[in-house]
Amino acid sequence: MILSNRIHKVLLCVIAWRLSSVFLVQTSDVPDEYWQSVEVAHRLAFGYGHLTWEWREGIRSYIYPFLISLIYRILGFFHLDFATLIIIAPRIMQALLSAYADYRFYVWTKNKWALFSLCTNWFWYYYASRTLVNTLETSLTTIALSIFPWRDSNTKSVSYIWIVAWLCVVRPTAAVIWTPLCLYHLLTTPTSGRIVLLLSYLRIGMTTLSIATLVDTIGYGKFVLSPIEFLRINFIYRVSDFYGTEPFFWYLTIGIPVILGLYYVIFLIGAWQVVQHPAKFHRQAVMLVVIGWTLAIYSMIPHKEIRFILPLLPFFVCLGTSGILCIKNSVAPFTRKVLMNVLVLTNLLPGLYFSLIHLRGSLDAMKILRQEIASVPNDDVNILFLTPCHATPFYSHLHANVTARFLTCEPSLSNRDDYIDEASEFFANPNLWLRQTYSNTKDTEMPTHLVLFHELAPSIHQFLDKYRLIADLFYAHITPTNYSQYLLIYKRK
Ligand SMILES: *[C@@H]1O[C@H](CO)[C@@H](O)[C@H](O)[C@H]1NC(C)=O
Ligand SMILES: *[C@@H]1O[C@H](CO)[C@@H](O)[C@H](O)[C@H]1NC(C)=O
């Protein structure tokens, strides 16, 4: 009774903690958070929303946008589809799922240090309420891990396979993490049960794939096997390289340090212990193999992003917990306290900076645009985003069917050497692009609002003559080329 009371308290606490991030995290991170989820869901529910090339080629699963679109439909049904609710509701859904994952993690590890490490991790706090498929993947991976049938556990249930199967249809790369674990499950099953287990894999896999394909077929309006398309496009055309490539050791030297910070050291201490006593730390040893295998595979893929290895977080934390226990037993209480405070502080500072300051301009800009739209009929609004592609969200954050255009940056699927995308063409010569695009346009069809970075303004000052500045928003301290510290919004005079 006392234990179950405590567990309920933990559940309420993690829900409150993850919900707080919906309101505290006021910055954007990567375009996919909007363009691959809520934008698509908005189109499903309200009939307008931009589909990027991934959705025209059929390489993404409609499952996640479909779930979000159900929330939108419910809001729409009750006439509660205010823009603010449309923006916040999917994030609340994701935050609740992340909180449930934290809770399952605690129930499974039964270790307060493990929960403490997961909840103080700044990167997970920063990501847990984002509508990114990586966030979904991390929470589902954690939940599946908590019901995984380890050799030394009482669980013999195969229900984790359902979660893994859904993960793999939504995000095919999740198969990398789960292949060693499924093999482990198969090998630790008595020989007599293996055929039955293989049949379960097959049955659950087929059921999931059928339902997912049905959802995709409805979403795309034609028969599509999105996981297969995803692999085909990525491996044959290597389009992901179009979005940048990184050296082999990038995850070890940049990726993990960003996610774990100082905890990286604790993880290494834990990992060292596990290597020395693999039999004593059976589960941790298996998890270490999973981490090594996943990092090796992901490191071989030239296009790397930190969020791709976020699903490894529960594994890192499990190993780190062994490290914490080791430190606890070997240092004086005072040193321990200092270490704990340093650990919390090194998460708090980046957490606050990235949640409140870095890259906040794009969401603030959408707020201003919503106010502008609210003041005139929709037909009179025509927004032109002269930023690098996808620098801001789109219809999902306007929730108004106004005319809007942004500079696209689609990869060439025909592998043409002379291919140049619209955004690059624009930035190579902004005035030329504006002249070509708007020379034969009637005055009434010119954009009413322009969104652009500060740096661009001087070079197109002639075009801006007909506009006045209505907002000058802080964007970020450090920005890539063609972005700058301030984001400007102009309105036609
Ligand atoms: C949105 O606006 C466009 C252009 O005015 C129009 O063609 C389209 O039907 C509208 N869609 C919805 C769902 O209102
Ligand atoms: C940034 O601008 C330069 C020209 O100033 C252009 O050559 C380059 O392609 C642009 N980069 C992107 C990502 O748009």
Image (cartoon, rainbow, N blue to C red):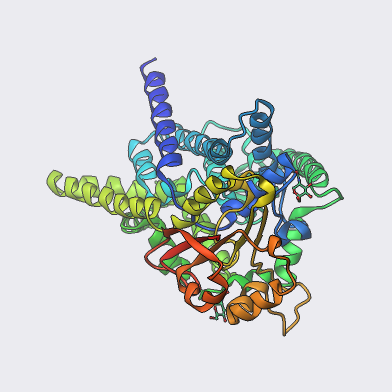
| Residue visible at 59% across and 50% down in the picture | 133
- Nearest the viewer among 415 and 290 is 415
In this picture, residue 148 sits left or right of residue 338:
right
Residue sitting farthest toward the bottom:
418
| Residue visible at 64% across and 67% down in the picture | 407
In this picture, residue 347 sits left or right of residue 335:
right
Q: Is residue 187 visible?
A: no
Q: Is residue 60 visible?
A: yes
The N terminus lies in quadrant? top left
The C terminus lies in quadrant? bottom right
Residue 359: image quadrant is bottom left
Name the spot of residue 147 as percent of width and height, x first.
55, 35
- Nearest the viewer among 332 and 380 is 380
Name the spot of residue 466 as percent of width and height, x first.
56, 67
In this picture, residue 189 sits left or right of residue 277:
right
| Residue visible at 38% across and 51% down in the picture | 356
Residue sitting farthest toward the right:
222
Above/below status of 197 relative to 183: above
Name the spot of residue 65 as percent of width and height, x first.
67, 44
In this picture, residue 10 sits left or right of residue 42:
left
Count the marks: how many?
0
Name the spot of residue 322 as percent of width and height, x first.
34, 47
Locate ligand 2 by image quadrant. Answer: bottom right
- Nearest the viewer among 128 and 482 is 482
